Image: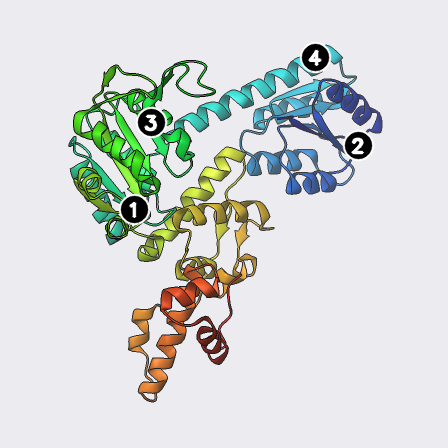
Amino acid sequence: MTERILIVDDSAGTRDALTGILEDEGYEVAAVGTAAEARDQWRIRSYDLVFLDLMLPDADGMELLDEALSDFVDLPIIVVSGHGNVDLAVKATRLGAYDFLEKPLALERVMLTVHNALDRRRMRREIEQLSHHLYPTELIGDSPAMRRLKSELERAGPSDSRILLMGENGTGKELAARRAHQLSARTHAPFVDVNCAAIPEELIESELFGHRKGAFTGATSDRTGRFQQADRGTLFLDEVGDMSLKTQAKVLRALQEQRFERVGGSDPIQVDVRVIAATNKDLEEEIQEGRFREDLYFRLAVIPIEIPPLRERREDVPRLVEHFAAAYAREQGRRPKTFAEEAMARLQSYAWPGNVRELRNFVERMMIMAPGHEITVRDLPAPIRNADGPPLDELLDIEYADLRAARAAFEKRFIERRLAEQGGNVSRTAEVLGLERSHLYRKIKAYDIDIPR
């Protein structure tokens, strides 16, 4: 990825000289002559390095430097100074500027300073990402549902028994699996994950068990499968309900015997693997429909654990939002934005059909697109902005004229909640409610319900 450099200098000659030098080195360069233009630039995009002349026509350069250092953590700023303001440049480096260069600029010194500044920034970013994001295992939240989940993982994790994690998409099943692995005696051994839904049927056996050279067209060398890669560690089978019956039979045998053969091979490979599986499907229903093996289900579900959807742990939303905002700010070197109290209340009222994954994506979008440092209700998209009705259980505390009015209020809120959970899809909502689509449309019109888009 091409690194971006911003030049802020009121001298057209300096801007042109630096732009030419840096573009010749392959950097993407923007050059402006005022503080106002500089603010416009870093409002619309991020930069990896800034050249800043402290003598600007429309602002005190030291104030602009302080503003940039406050908003962009870890942004290297190289101060450019003339002969008469070297003392000011030294003061700027003490405040946090990376270095200062005296005019007239020397090509070799410019490039050495740029390379060193960007190398340090890259290294610090890599260390930060490794320490915070490589293998996250923190389950955030202190709601009753999350306390129950954490307690179950604390008890199940240290055992060597198989775990089946059940929950909707985006609830954090992989995070729970990694937490169970971290709590086990296998914590220093590999954690190997396989998304069974993402691998084509003709390749999944090779992916799980490996293959011998020449086993099929394209098998130009031996391949080690995920079961073997996870030896003495944990194998996480995500979306296990999407495996074909043929693959299920082979996985069942591998679990029973803790050994298998590679595709195209005949030598048995012995492994010691703990399997944690996850699914967003109702496997008992899949068994009834003949799409999942009952014997495999009982092998996997030694310890079944339900991962709660976000709508059942609304009190965790503020902590999750704060965590995701801080994580994004660290990654981008920016100051995290905050949510106004009323905006946060709307986030807690919204059903989040995509669960924690949807919330994380939403927070990142707000960090980028919201114009101010505080996000208000006006900044929220319509489905979330309109999620301000009372929870269903609170409807019981409202005084109604008669039973018909109470039923209408409950029915309206119930339909709104289900519509939000289905992302505004009327057909899916009708199916969930057990109504004809035309009947649901009539109720939506009668209750004046806004369909989230």
Nearer to us in this view, 453 or 382: 453
Q: Where does the image place residue 193, in percent across and percent down from the top left?
A: 34, 30
Can residue 138 be seen? no
Q: Residues within 10 Å of mark 3 (few under 14, many from 20)?
A: many
Can residue 94 be seen? yes
**Residue beneath the point at 48% across and 24% down:** 126
Residue placed under numbered mark 3 in the picture: 208
Labels 2 & 1 near each other (Cβ < 8 A) = no
The label on residue 291 is: 1
Single out the residue that lies furthest toward the bottom: 401
Give the quarter of the image for residue 268: top left
**Residue beneath the point at 34% across and 81% down:** 407
Q: Indicate which disc, 2 or 1, sits on the residue closer to the N terminus.
A: 2
Q: Give the foreground label among 1 and 3.
A: 1
Q: Would you place residue 9 above or below residue 438 in this image?
A: above
Q: Where does the image place residue 186, in percent across and percent down from the top left?
A: 22, 24
**Amino acid found under the numbered disc labelled 4:** Arg
**Residue beneath the point at 29% across and 70% down:** 393
Q: Where does the image place residue 77, in percent across and percent down from the top left?
A: 63, 27
Q: Is residue 322 left or right of residue 393?
A: right
Q: Where does the image place residue 334, in percent across and percent down from the top left?
A: 54, 37
Q: Give the foreground label among 1 and 4.
A: 1
**Amino acid found under the numbered disc labelled 3:** Leu
Labels 3 & 4 near each other (Cβ < 8 A) = no
Q: Indicate which disc, 1 or 4, sits on the residue closer to the N terminus.
A: 4
Residue placed under numbered mark 4 in the picture: 109
Residue placed under numbered mark 2 in the picture: 10
Describe the element under mark 2 as helix, strand or loop.
loop
**Residue beneath the point at 78% across and 37% down:** 57
